[in-house]
Amino acid sequence: MRQIGLRVEILFNILFLTAVAMFLIGIIAFKVTERFALQGKIEGVESIIAAFDSLYAKEGNLEGGINFLKDVLEPGAWGVVADDQKRSVFHTDSGQTPVSITDPLVIEVMKTGRQTVDVEGINLPPFSFYKGFKIVSPLKKGGIRKGVILIYQPLTSLEENLVLGRRLIAISIILDLIVIAFFGFYILSRRVVRPVHKLIKTTEEIARGKFPSEKDLGGVKEVNQLYEALKKMYDEIEASKLKLKENLEAIEESNRALLRAQRELVASEKLASLGKLAAGVAHEIGNPLSAISGYVEVLKKGYIFDDEKKTEFLTNIQREVERMDRIIRTLLDYSRPKDLELKKVEVNDLIGRVVDIIKTQGILKNIELKSELFNGLMHIEADPHQLSQVIINLILNAKDAVSKDGVITVSTSRTLNGGVEITVKDNGTGIPKEVMDKIFDPFFTTKEPGKGTGLGLSVSQRIVQTFNGNISVESEPGKGTIFKIVFPVDEARRHGEGFSN
C-alpha cells in the first residue's frame, strides 16, 4: 500500500476543507449578488414604467411615450402598450420589426389591476441562468384603469456580468488555496512535522538503547507530552532491564545450584540403588550359600554317613545352587534387555490360555480362579510371551496372598478412550499402606526368605512400560488387592526393548 507523508496528509485535508468552505461561501455570495442585480434590473424597469405612466400615458401621448421607452430601455427590449382605443408594439432595436402579440399576462393584469413580474430562465440550484423578465402594469387616468403596458427586458448584460462574477470567484478560490497551501506547508513543517520527525528519531535512538538529549520540540503541547511519555517509558524499560538482568543472574545461579544438587542426587541415587541391589543380592544369595557351606563343613569333618544321607546332602546342595542360579538369571532378566517379538494380541484369547495353563498345573489348590472378559476389545501390539509372563506373575503373587477358599479374578474392560484394561483381583490379606510405594522396587518383597526374589513385580513393570502401558495397584489390608494394567491402544506406541524370563 502506498503511503504519504504527514505533511501532505494534513495539508491535503486542510486544502480540501478550505476549498469546500470557500466554494460554499462563494456560492452564497454569488446568489446574493445575483439576486440583488436581478432585483435592480426589475426595479429600474418599474421606474421607467412609472415615468411613462405619469409623463405620457395620463396625457394620452402614447407615441411620445413609446419613443421615450425606446430611448431608456436596454437593447433588445420590446413591449406592448394598449388602451381602450388601440394597441402599439415597439422594439428598442431599429432593425427588429415589432409584431402584434397577445400575452396571457396582459389579460390577467387587465382583470386584476395588479402589476405582475415574470422571470424567464433556468433555475438549477445553486446555479441559475436568466434569459429575461416581463413586467405587465396597468395604466390609470384619474384613478381609473385606461390601459396596460408590457415590457420584456432581456438579461444578456446581467448574464455576462454573472459569468464574469463566477470566474472571479473561482480565481479567488484558487489563489486563496495557493496562498493557504504555501503558508500551510511552511507552518506545518515548522510546528508539526519537524517535531514528529524528531520523535521518530527519538524512538530509533531508543531502539538502539539510548535516549537522546534533544528537548526542543516546538510549542505543540501534545508533541511535548508524547516526548515526555517516551522518556518515561524509556526510563521504565531501563529499570526493567536492570531488574531482569539481576533476576537472570539469580536464576542462573539457582540453575547452577540445582545442577549441582541434581548431580549429587543422581550420584546418591546410584549409590543407593547399588547398595540396595548389593544388599538384595547378598541377602538372597547369602542364605543358600550358608546352607551349602554348612553341608560342606559337615562333609569335611569326615562323619560317616550312609549313602541315603549323603544323597540327601548332595540333593540339598544342588537345590541351593539351583536357587542361586535362579536368582542370578532373574537379575539378568531385569538388567539385560532382549529383542521383542511384537504381534497383534487379542487380549481375551491370551488371558484364556493363561488361565487354562494355571488351572492345568494344579498350583492353585483350594483357590478359585475366575475370568470375566469384555467382548469387543481392540487388539494391542505386544510380545505375547512376555505379556503372559506378567499376568502369570500377578496370578502367582495373588495366590501367595490368599488363603484357602480364596478367589482370584482376571478381568478385561475398555477404557474411556478406547484402550484395554486388564485387572487381576484377589480377596487376600492385602498390602500394608507403608509398603505400597515400594512394591515395584527391585528386591523388595513381603514374602518369607527363600520364597521370593523381589524382582517379579519390577520385571513386570518394565515389560508393561515397554508396550507403552501402565501398571498400578490398589489395596486395602484385609480386603484384597487389585493390579491394573492399561494399554492406551488409540495412542502411538513407543516400542522399546523387552525382557524375557
Image: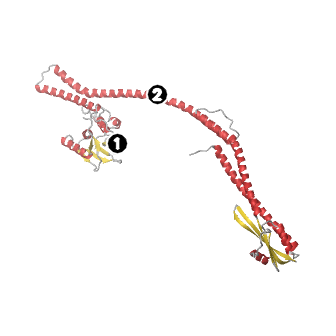
Relative depth, front residue between 364 and 240: 240
Q: Nearer the viewer, residue 267 or 103?
A: 103
Residue 1 point in image, percent of width and height: 56, 46
Give the labeled residue for mark 1.
492
Say whether disc 1 or disc 2 marks the residue closer to the N-terminus.
2
Q: In percent of the image, x 66 and y 46: which residue is there?
A: 10
Residue 256 numbered mark, or none: 2
Q: Amino acid at mark 1?
A: Ala
| Left or right, 299 with reference to 165 | left
Q: Kindly identify which numbered label has been placed on residue 457.
A: none
> Is disc 2 surrounded by few (<14), some (14 to 19) or many (20+) residues within 10 Å?
few
Confirm whether residue 15 shows in the render. yes
Taking the view exactly as shown, the residue that stands out farthest to the top is 301
Q: Residue at x 31, y 45 (%)?
A: 421
Residue 161 location, quadrant: bottom right
Image quarter of residue 279: top left
Q: Amino acid at mark 2?
A: Arg
Residue 400: percent from the left, percent from the top? Answer: 25, 38
**Mark 2 and mark 1 in contact (Cβ < 8 Å)?**
no
The residue located at (66%, 39%) in the rendering is: 195
Above or below for 121 versus 282: below
In the depicted view, which residue is nearer to us: 191 or 282? Answer: 191
